[in-house]
Structures are given as C-alpha cells and as structure tokens.
Image (cartoon, rainbow, N blue to C red):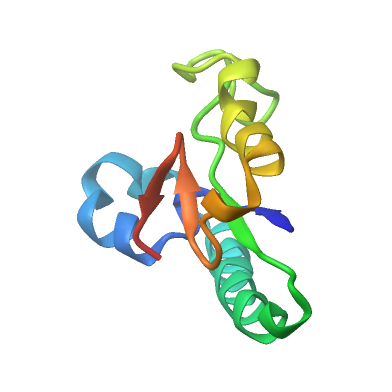
Amino acid sequence: MVNQSSMLGSLGSGESMWDQIGCFMTVGCSTSKAGLDMLTLIQSKTLADKGIVVAASIPGWAKTDLGTRAAPMEVEEGAQTAVELVTIARERFPDGQLVHKGARVAW
C-alpha cells in the first residue's frame, strides 16, 4: 500500500527546512499529511502479520495546479516515487517508511 504524503507534513523537514518551506505550510495541509504519515506507520505495524506492506510517498514540488508553474519538477518526475513504490520488488519495499526519490525522509 502506498499513501501519498508531502514534505509539508514531515515534522523533520518542517524543523530542519523551515526557512525554505515554512511559508508553504498551512494548518490544514501540513497537519493532515502529518496524520497520514502516522497512519502509514500504524498500518505498516498492524498489517504486517497479514503480509501487507505500507509506505508513504512524497512527490516533491511539481508543476500542478497546486504546485504552480514555479515548481522545479515536471509532473512525471513528481510521480516517479509513487510509481517506483508500486512496482518495486516486495523484498526491497521500504515498509513503514516515508520516501522521496528512493531515499528515506525523516517523519
């Protein structure tokens, strides 16, 4: 299972990158994505005995209606993480992790 999250919901990113992303963090978006991140962690733990693996994908800032043309990434690049997660070999799946471009991101 892959949940679609955001860098704006990552507590670690909010703390370490506040100067860069703080102006984009809104109460509704950031708290709902932080909640989704916790749901991902809980699901990965509670569904493990059923053989279900769960991770959260961060697309990054992409040129969408929400991201605007100012975003540095094209939509295809933003979709790359989610596509990789749904096609990765099960033994390499980053269960219980928050992932962006193949790398783990701090919750």
How far from the left and from the top, in percent, is residue 40?
Answer: 62, 70
How far from the left and from the top, in percent, is residue 72?
Answer: 44, 16
Q: For the point 45% across and 44% down, which residue is it?
A: 24
The correct choice, above or below, for 35 with respect to 83 in the image is: below
Q: For the point 71% across and 42% down, which residue is it?
A: 86
Q: For the point 53% across and 44% down, which residue is it?
A: 58
The correct choice, above or below, for 24 with respect to 45 in the image is: above
Q: Left or right? Give the position of 65 relative to 42.
A: right
In the rendered image, which quarter is residue 49 located in?
bottom right
Q: For the point 42% across and 60% down, which residue is it?
A: 10
Relative depth, front residue between 1 and 63: 1
Q: Left or right? Give the position of 50 relative to 14.
A: right
For the question of whether residue 25 can be seen, the reply is no
Location of the C terminus (image quadrant): bottom left
In the rendered image, which quarter is residue 29 located in?
bottom right
How far from the left and from the top, in percent, is residue 68?
Answer: 59, 21
Q: Left or right? Give the position of 7 relative to 68.
A: left
